[in-house]
Image: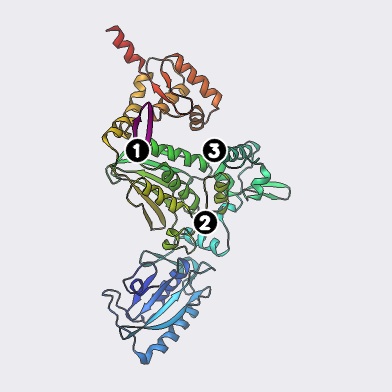
Amino acid sequence: MARDTLFSGESKNIEYKITLPDKSEKYMKTIVAFANTQGGKLIVGIDDKTHEIVGVANEILFQLMDGIANAISDSCMPQIIPDIEPQTIDGKTVIIVSVEAGKNRPYYLKSKGKENGTYIRVAGTSRQAFPEKIRELEMEGARISWDELTCVGYPVSKEATEKLCSDIENFREKAGMAERSVKKEQLINWKILKQSEGQLLATNAYALLTSDYFPFSKTQCAVFKGTDRAVFLDKREFIGPIYTQIESAVDFVLRNIRLGATIDGLVRKEKYELPPEAIREMIINAHCHRNLLDESCIQVAIYDNRLEVTSPGGLYNGLTYEEVMNGHSKIRNRAIANIFSQMGLVEAWGSGIKRILNAAKEYGLPEPKFQEFDNMFRVELFRNNSMTESEKEAGESSEKVRRRVGEGSDIIRGYELSDTQKKIVNLLLYDRQLSAAKIAEQLGMGSRSIEKNIKKLKELGILIRHGSPKNGYWEVIDCGKKNNEDTE
C-alpha cells in the first residue's frame, strides 16, 4: 500500500492508535473486523485525531510487537495470523499490523462468543455484526451459497419446472445465444434442483425463479419529486420470478425517464436520456449479488437528477472497492448467477461495473457513483439535460406519460370493456411501443388472448397501429372526446 494511502487518514481498511490500550479487547475488535471483511492495517504510533506520527520508543518496540501477536493469538477465534512489522517514517518508528481477509469466517472474540463477539468494518469503524451477517459469514467460511440450499417444504411442480425451462430457452433466443433445449436434468446440473432418494427437491434458487415464495424477494420502484425521498410521484412493487422482476423494473424506469427523438427524413429515431444497457445492468447486478439472508428488498429510485439502485448486502467475501472497479468479481449467489449466465443476462463475470461506466461515458453523462454503506450497495446513474429542445419536443417526458395514464379512465369511460381490455389501454398509455407478447407477459396471460382483446379495441376505434409490427407504435384514441367534437 502506498505511503500516501497508508498515512492519509483512517478508512475501512486503516485504523490508527497513538498507543496500545491497556485492554487488548479494544483493538482486538478491529483485528476481528478486518479478518471478517476486506482485511486492513492497524498502525500503532499515529494520533487518530491529528494524524501526527508520534512513533513508538525503540526500547519497547519489540516488546509491543510480541504483545500484539500474543493478544491476537489468545483473543481471536478461529486463529488469525497477522503480519507485524516496524516501519520508520520521518525518523519515527511505527508498528504496522496487517490482517488479510480471512477464509475461515466468522472470526470473533473468544471472551464474547460468536453471537456477541463478531465484528465487521463499516466505513472507518468496527461494528458488531447483526445475526444475518453472522449467518452469511458462516456460509462464506463453509464455502456454501444460500441459493443452492434445499428450500424445505417448497414443492417441485411439473408446470413450474417446464415454465422455467421454457423461459430460459426464450431468454437465450432473445440474447442471440446458441439454441439449447433445457430440461429438468439441466436444472439439476445447475444446482437449481436436487435429487435425493429418487425425489426432486427444490433449492432456494428454484423458489426465487418460479414464485414469490420469499417475502423479501421483490423489487420496489418509485419516482420522486426533486432530489430526495420527500414526495412520491409514482411507485410500483414487482414480485414473482426474479427475472420477470428485472424486466418489469427496467420497463418502469424507461417509462419514467425522458424519451427524446430526432426526425431524420421520414425516419423517427428515439433515444432515452439514460442508456438502457446501464439501467438493465444495474438492476441485474442488484439481483445477482444481493445478500439473500437480509430481509430487505431491492429498491429502484428515480429522482430529478439521478437513477439509484440499492441492494441488500455490501461487497462479498473480502472483495474490495478497488477490485470491483478493476473488474474483479466474487459470486455471492452461485446458482442464480449461473442461471443468469445461461439466460444471457450476464455476459462476463466482473464486467457489470465497467459496462455501466462505459455506457454512461458514451452517453456523455457524469461518471456513475458506487457506494457501500450499512451493509448495502448502491449505484447512482446521473441524469443530465443534454437533450436538445427539439429532441424533447419530439419525445416524451415522464410527466406527460403519467398525465396520459391519468386520462385513461376518461378514454375508456362509456365503453363496456373487460378488465383485460382496460388494463391493455392503461399499459399502452404508459408505453405505446409494447408488443402483444410484452403485454401478455406483464399481465400474466397468453399472447393469443391479448391479441383477441387488442383486435376488439381496434374495432372500437380505441387503438390505432402506426408503422411496422417491429418498429411501430400504438395510438390510444379518446373516442368520447372526438364524438363530442363531431356533434358540436
Q: Is mark 1 on a helix, strand or loop?
A: loop
Q: Which residue is drawn at 70% across and 46% down?
A: 199
Q: Which residue is drawn at 40% across and 30% down?
A: 431
Q: Position of residue 406 (x, y in %)?
A: 33, 27
Please tell me whether mark 3 or mark 2 is closer to you in this view.
3
Give the amino acid type for the residue marked by disc 2 in the picture.
Answer: Arg
Q: Earlier in the sequence, mark 3 or mark 2?
A: 3
Q: Residues within 10 Å of mark 1 (few under 14, many from 20)?
A: many
Residue 123 lies left or right of residue 104; in this view the side is: left
Q: List the residue tagged with mark 2.
A: 332
Q: List the residue tagged with mark 1.
A: 257
Residue with the most extreme top position: 487
Q: Earlier in the sequence, mark 2 or mark 1?
A: 1
Distance (Cα) linking label 2 and label 1: 31 Å
68 relative to 112, above or below = below
In the image, the segment drawn in magenta is: 257-271
Give the number of the disc on residue 174.
3
